[in-house]
Image (cartoon, coloured by chain):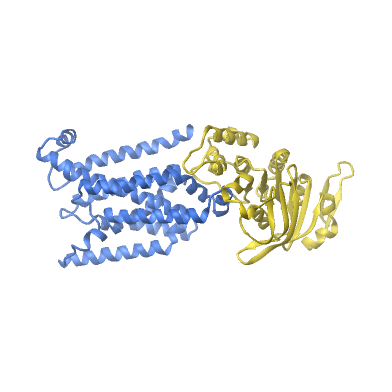
Amino acid sequence: MSKLKSRLPFIVYLLIVIIILCFLSFLVGSTKISASKVVSSIFSFGNSNSSSIIWQIRMPRLFLAILSGTLIAMAGSILLGIFGTVIIDNMIVKASYLAGSAVAAVSVFMMLFGANLDPLYPWFLGSLAGTTWDRVLLIALFVIAGLVVYVFYYKDLNALLFGEYTAKTLGVEVTRIRVFLFAIASVISLIAVYSCGLLCLAVLILPYFVRLATGVNYKYLIPVSILSSASLIILLDIFSRIVFPAELPLGIIAVAVSGPFYIYALQRRRLGL
Amino acid sequence: MEMLKIEAMDAGYEENVVIKNVSLDSDIGDFIGIIGPNGCGKTTLLRAIAGLINIFNGQVKIRGKDIRRINRREIAKRVAFVPQLMVPTAGFTVEETVLLGRTPYIGRFAFETDRDYRIAKKAAEELKVEHLIDTPVTSLSGGEFQRVAIARALAQESKILLLDEPTSHLDFRFSIKVLRMIRRLREEKLIIATFHDLNLAARFSRKLMLINKGEVIAFGRPDAVLTNENLKQAFRMKLEVRKNPKTGKLRIVNA
């Protein structure tokens, strides 16, 4: 059990972080609600103004942030497992990142000149504003499906870590598993795009860094990645509400924040680390 | 029916034939050492026996069954493979690494049972790493990790155990220690290992297979295989085989 003992503090720490972030996300928004009022609103389903803001606006938004983080973490971890560190070198990832950045740049430019971005907005830039419970429930179904795949396939992802030959000698049908998991990761990514916008996929890089901290054992990598990605998305969402009263799209912040990490990862890769 | 039967096998990667016309009959209790110069196909031969690469002609039969007709999971229950350079993977303890050997026995929608943990523990005991069971593999020494890698293969409970250069990055003392442990396993397994070190191969193997350029030059008891002529043909240098008159041990020196 000592292995659990050494890993538990990390997970507990992340849980505390996420709880604090959840609370913060209730506080922040165009209507000011005091901390004490937040607490009383959460625990009472009253019809007060603050209670309906918390329950109908901020709560679904927070849940969607957590679910989006979960989706992105699962897709990122799975891709990392089937491509190895190659994912960083992977042209697809680079290309999509560049494309994403280009879209972001163009959109900011267009916004400055007052062009109408409405049709583009939800799919590319992503925003959690105006999230409804219906949407949260729909995404939650996919998250649950993704978690089921994780529970039953983390063993294969672990075997794949040891290389193709070793995975095969452990009885894993390597090609079939890779194709299957790639399909799953693609679907999860698509749902994530639907949930929080294309640019949020920039956060796919996070499991790569989580791995440096926790090691690669998928039993722990996926839960820790989920907690960190969810925290990050909540944080970015809070940020988008505080810094820009008009709400800067979440995706743009995600790209801006993760940019340096991509550069760092590519550099590490180049140095063969 | 013999455990492993190879019949005039040609094997290799994609279109390239690396191993030519290899035949072998062997059974539990055997310890076969495969020797030969770098790039002669030692590792490729092990991979072919594990069903990892293409077999172009002939066949590999395990208990009479063509390996190409057995699915991965079933092969994994019959053949375990310790690769040459298994890299310790961050985030795994010794126990978790050894438990990987139980993978073929754990169903898709199931998890490790107490029995799997027991078998993993027994494998760790066999290789004398049970006291390290909760240690992260990244903090082990080379000798310790090599034993963990072998314990993982043992947990597969296969009748055939393949080891690719099991002593390649161990010092002399650890090489002997690890090979003694492997030799003990022979009682209930067929062991096939590749060797760089001819002296270690001669000392621990019951039979040797000398390979050059993918073809078998000699196969049989060590003193029959390790002759000056055979070694010269394979290694293209003058090597001399000396026999200790008292112990009967063979020693190969550069003449």
Q: Chain A shown in which color?
A: blue
Asked whether, in this view, residue B232 is left or right of residue B181, the answer is right
| B41 w.r.t. B79: above or below | below
- Residue that appears at 43% across and 59% down: A88
Q: Residue at x 52, y 41 (%)?
A: B106
Q: Residue furthest left?
A: A48
Q: Residue furthest right?
A: B245
The front one of B30 and A256 is B30
- Name the foreground residue: A158 vs A271: A158
Residue B155 in which image quadrant: top right
Query: Which residue does the image show at 25% across and 41% down from the upper left?
Result: A22
Count of numbered labels shown in the rendering: 0
Q: What residue is drawn where x is 14% and y is 43%?
A: A53
Left or right of A271? Residue A147 is left
Relative side of A38 to A9, left or right: left
Of the pair B241 and B96, the residue shown nearer to us: B96
How far from the left and from the top, in percent, is residue A254?
29, 55
Q: Is residue B2 above or below residue A109?
A: above
Q: Is residue A250 visible?
A: yes
Q: Could you say where residue A191 lies in the image, as x and y percent from the top left?
A: 31, 54
Q: Identify whether B114 is placed above or below B66.
A: above
Give the x, y percent position of residue B178.
68, 41
User: Looking at the image, can residue A33 be seen?
Assistant: no
Q: Colour of chain B?
A: yellow
Tell whether B211 sits left or right of A171: right
Where's residue A253, x and y in %? 26, 55
